Amino acid sequence: MADSGLATEFVARYRATRWWVKVLAIFALSRVITTSLLLWFASIQQANPWTGASPGYFDFARIWDGHWYFIIAMSGYPTELPMTADGAVGESAWAFMPAYPFLVRLGMLITGVDYGIIAVLVSVAFALGAALMFYKLMALVLPESSAMFAVVLFCVAPLSPILQVAYAESMHLFLLTLALYFLVQRRYVLLFPVVLVMSLTRPSGLAFALALLMHVIHRWITRRDDPFPVADRVVTVILGLFSAVMGTAWLLIAAAVTGSLTAYTDTELAWRSAYGDFGQFVPFAAWFHGAEFWAGWWGIPIPLLFALLIALIVAFFAALFTRPARRLGVDLRFWVASYALYLLAVFFPQSSTFRLLMPLFPALGAFAVPKSPVYRVVLVALCVVGQWAWIHLGWWVDGSDWTPP
């Protein structure tokens, strides 16, 4: 009886706790888990191109692309594109957008603190903001318990270590969550500044423009049941065009500064050189080129891998029509579909692709719908194991490492 009374009191206190306190607790506990994993890998890290052996946390958190962001924060972007020995455009800072490194640089100037520390603090602050906004977003479409569990999944997801290193993902996910929140609430005017900064943080403007196009078409089709006022029609069309322009803004800025119209795409293609010579950028070709490369690597017949790729794509989009996914509403599914199409159009599948899948995170709401305690505990445990696997595969540098995160 006493145990029953204590359990009842605990449940009552939990329900009375403010939502943001619950999210803070979830976020803090998840960071303890993830930080422990990162520190363990740092302790066994050997000397590498960025650090010595067994680096401290802030040094370990600024490797890989974190060093590119350091270069941008300290010296900006080159006016001339570097060239390789065979005359191709080489890797440079132009592959990375300016909002995050410039914000980190501002923090360094204000505080006088080292890049690694400020970069991590900025990332963690935006990660917390993203977790808080994600609950608000999920609460628009899911019951409270499912919305809170979606936050748990966001905080412990296999790629969640990226939320506390010197990468722009935390900032982008916060801005994306805010943008989706305003979109679902149809607060269109507030979206303009969010889309502007978001599009200069990570590539997202074109995908968001496609989601807006789907949103407008859906509102037009359903206007008899759900009025679509003229004012909303005008502002959504303008917003969609603005997002499309912002989706190409960085390409135009790179072209203006370097004098090369293809500066950005050529720089992105430089990172694919290790996987073969694919010539010019061709939309929707990269995944099939990737299938050809990985078929040779894994010893799988190319037609079979093509068939598996097509089956995976069909299964992904079919999943958006399942009952748990439909609980998310049309706008969040529009975003998931739009961003997936964007990835299919422009990205080459390799180890970084796992990180590039992170903007699909609203789909976590579908996984949060089932209420079985066993299901939820197992899913969280699998996520934590996934963190270990991803850090081992993508972040930890194991000799001559070919798996950048």
Image: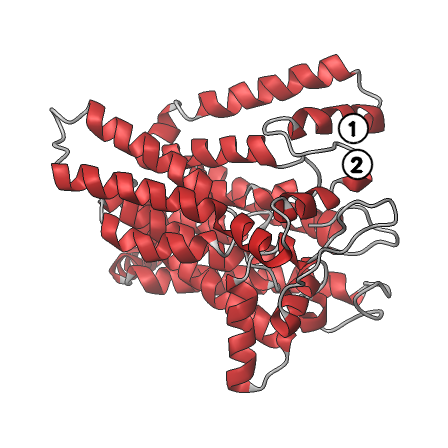
Type of amino acid under label 2 = Tyr
Q: Residue at x 48, y 40 (%)?
A: 360
In the foreground, 131 or 188? 188
Q: Looking at the picture, how far across and down is residue 203, in whole percent?
A: 52, 47
Q: Is residue 374 left or right of residue 14?
A: right
Q: Is residue 167 visible?
A: yes
| Helix, strand or loop at mark 2 | helix
The label shown at residue 312 is none
Q: Looking at the picture, how far across and down is residue 379, in whole percent?
A: 53, 41
Mark 1: few, some, or many residues within 10 Å (few <14, many ≥20)? some
Mark 2: few, some, or many residues within 10 Å (few <14, many ≥20)? some
Q: Looking at the picture, how far across and down is residue 128, in whole percent?
A: 44, 63
Colouring: secondary structure
Residue found at the far bottom of this picture: 112
Establish if 370 lies above or below 57: above
Residue 208's image quarter? Answer: top left
In which quadrant is the N terminus drawn?
bottom left
Q: Is residue 401 left or right of residue 169?
A: right
Q: Is residue 193 left or right of residue 199?
A: left
Mark 1 lies on residue? 293
In the foreground, 355 or 222? 222
| Helix, strand or loop at mark 1 | helix
Type of amino acid under label 1 = Phe
Establish if 285 lies above or below 94: above
In the foreground, 190 or 383? 190
Mark 2 lies on residue? 275
Q: Is residue 328 visible?
A: no
Q: Residue at x 60, y 47 (%)?
A: 158
| Label pair 2/1, CB-CB below 8 angstroms | yes
Q: Earlier in the sequence, mark 2 or mark 1?
A: 2
Q: Residue at x 67, y 35 (%)?
A: 349
Residue found at the far front of this picture: 259
